[in-house]
Image (cartoon, grey):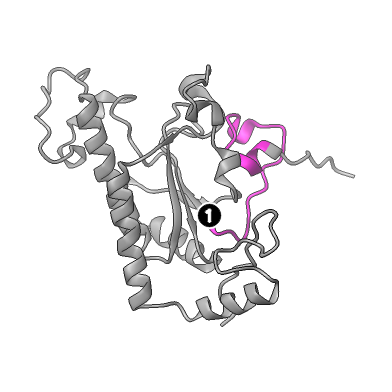
Amino acid sequence: MSYVPPALGSYLKIGACRHGERCSRKHIKPQFSQTIVIMNMYQNPMHNPGMTSNPHLRPPGAPPLDPHNLESKMSEDETKEYFDKFYEDVYCELVKYGNLLEMHVCDNVGDHLIGNVYARFDWEDEAQRAVEELNKRWYAGRPLYAELSPVTDFREACCRQNDLGQCDRGGFCNFHHIRRPTRSLLRELQQQQRKERLENPDPRDEERRKEMEMFGFDGAGAPGGGGGGYSPPRRGGRY
């Protein structure tokens, strides 16, 4: 009987492994998932300052870089503006594939997490369609590499110490260090998506509402009697 390595629990939790293909544990990649990951998509100018000389990556209004000084870095305000522009670009693209529940960008520097973009959709077929289409696309002169991710709970995937400003591993931490857009931008993007959702509802929404009522859950996905959250399976292609 051939040896089957045990599954790696941390891979299932954070959707990445620092050992990559050399890992002695098994990485179980999902066949179905509401979550996708686009690997190494965000090019952080603070981690790779030279690449910001690409004019297509520069945020609006940023001063030009000296081509002879690839160590030039953006100011903190310019970096925030650059990231907001990136976040808006990606968010507006992803909502074309379905109802986007959440999107997170890793600010880690380890090879397995650097620049990863994680996105969770309402339905599994939306995530599958996003993966198929994104793998045909390029962004900022680089091909995109997307796949389904096993991550289901980003509260477990994120570094809680980093959120408190207390992570002693810095960018090399194996849990997600999330870089967040400005609140006003995120609120605007979410409101726009909700508006479009109301104008063009997915017929499966009503079916899901009936399922949730049958299981005794309210419209927010929380059980009427308290306890942990629940979400019925959202497998696409049934209707």
How far from the left and from the top, in percent, is residue 214?
69, 77
User: Residue 104, relative to residue 72: is it above or below?
Assistant: below
Q: Quadrant of residue 60?
A: top left
Q: Which quarter of the image is occupied by the N terminus? A: top right
Instruction: Determine if residue 15 is in view.
Output: no
Q: Quadrant of residue 221?
A: bottom right
Q: Residue furthest front?
A: 225
Give neighbour class at mark 1: few <14, some 14-19, many 20+ (Cα, 10 Å): many
Q: Which residue is mark 1?
A: 35
Name which residue lies at 37% across and 62% down: 95
How far from the left and from the top, in percent, is residue 62?
12, 33
Instruction: Determine if residue 3 is in view.
Output: yes
Q: Quadrant of residue 49?
A: top left
Segment colored magenta:
10-35
Front one among 193 and 15: 193
Name which residue lies at 25% across and 31% down: 79
Front one among 140 and 116: 116
Residue 25 falls left or right of residue 53 = right
Name which residue lies at 78% across and 39% down: 6
